[in-house]
Amino acid sequence: MARGCHDFTRTELVRRAAAQAGCGLPAIEAGMPLPAGTGLTRRSFVAHSIGFAMAVYGATRIPLPLFEEGVASAAGGGKVLVSVFLDGGADALSILAPVGDPQYRVLRPRLALPDSGLAFAEDGRLRWHPSLASLATLHGEGKVTVMPSVGYTHPDQSHFTSRHFWEVGATSTQLQTGWLGRVIDRIGSDDNPLQGLSLDYNLQPSLATAKRPVASLDSPQGYDFWTPKVWGSVEDQLLKSVAQLGAAHAKGTDPALRQAGRATGQSMRLREQLQPFASEKATSPVTYPKSDDAFPARLRSLAMMLATGLPIRCVALRAPGTYDTHSDQPKELADALKLTSDSLLAFQRDLEARGLADRVLVHVWTEFGRRAKENGSNGTDHGAAGVGFLLGTQTTGTMVGEYPGLSGGLDEDGNLKATADFRAVYAALSEQWLGVDAASIIPSAKSFTQPQLVR
């Protein structure tokens, strides 16, 4: 199994702590940025004792009843951006292998991939990784925009810092809101936490807001109530009784009981809304990959949530696998890419079958690429420019930037140079897809030339 470096492990520990407000943070060294959203108010939605699986962040001003009014009034229908993170720095030179570049096998005598036969039409030197046949299929249909060498100037090879830059949309250690969080602050409301949805146990920092509520939900299937040794018709009657008690107290004169009654009523309504997504009751027009990893199930649930009209605008989640492949890279990378690619194809087909495809774009990104030269552990070390994708029927399907080649396209450290800047991509997504002035989202947005990403 591939092993991640100490920086990767520490980064994960710190970010988990930061996403759980009040838990404290491990030691952060001088110059390291605080993760976006650190200290953001976190409110479990509802009491821990009855098994709630959802958390609302930044909800200090959110009025009750939350879903009865806020979510209903913000009925879905707008454009949706889904951010998928390849955690650990995915190897761009394996994802799109430059089999036609003579330096490839010189730099990677063991790790160089054979010609997969999956031609990348926009550059004859490149081939798709054999595990990415599903992504290659969508690219052939004009539904994938590829960024073969995307990054930023003066690249930082720390997972912690580089990931922070991508999450906040700037090469700044000072920003504490995510770039998608700032979008929600501009287009969102005070009473709809589903507008920014982190499909994870914790809040993804890119969704950290300054004033609007956002939510973290591991999966709709995990949202339910339980009581030891109570099930079936007895459980149904119990839940009905709880709902009735909540409704009675919601109209009472005691402020504490009234608030508890409203919270109980909200929880019951949300349970009813999410019940159709439970695995044994859910139906989907396509078959998703079967896996112990939650990624395909989360995408499947997301398609269902969008189909029901829930007011979701920005979504963030992590792809399966760990891409910090300092050792034993081939199998770890192949397995992670296949599950990710096959799941994304299923999600796209699901959206198309439901008539939702023109509303949704999926952005796939990673904090950096890997070094061009392999290391001595059958792996690759931290690099500079990485690879990114934009999936959907409304993407232009035209390559952004170019593959710079291994002869003249490496920097002084032997890393791939960026031919596209991620901040320009974010600026373009802000304006062309989400309808927000890029200058209000991305610092110095006017200094970047926006690629045309949307048809």
Image (cartoon, rainbow, N blue to C red):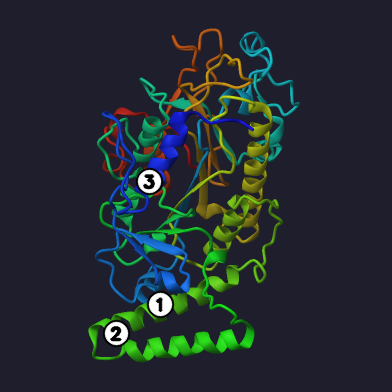
Mark 3 near mark 1, Cβ–Cβ under 8 Å? no
- Nearer-N-terminus badge (2/3): 3
Q: Residues within 10 Å of mark 2 (few under 14, many from 20)?
A: some
Q: Is residue 435 visible?
A: no
Residue 236 lies, in percent from the top left, at 57, 86
Residue 233 lies, in percent from the top left, at 62, 88
**Looking at numbered disc 2 in the image, what kind of residue is underneath it?**
Arg
Q: Residue visible at 42% across and 24% down?
A: 157
In the rendered image, the vertical position of residue 176 relative to residue 65, given as above or below: above
What distance separates the C-alpha of mark 3 from that of mark 1? 27 Å
Q: Quadrant of residue 117?
A: top right
What distance separates the C-alpha of mark 2 from that of mark 3? 34 Å
Residue 297 lies, in percent from the top left, at 61, 56
Mark 1 or mark 2: which is in front? Answer: 2
> Which label belongs to residue 205?
3
Q: Residue visible at 70% across and 57% down?
A: 286
Circle 2 residue = 258
What distance separates the C-alpha of mark 1 from that of mark 2? 12 Å
Circle 1 residue = 266
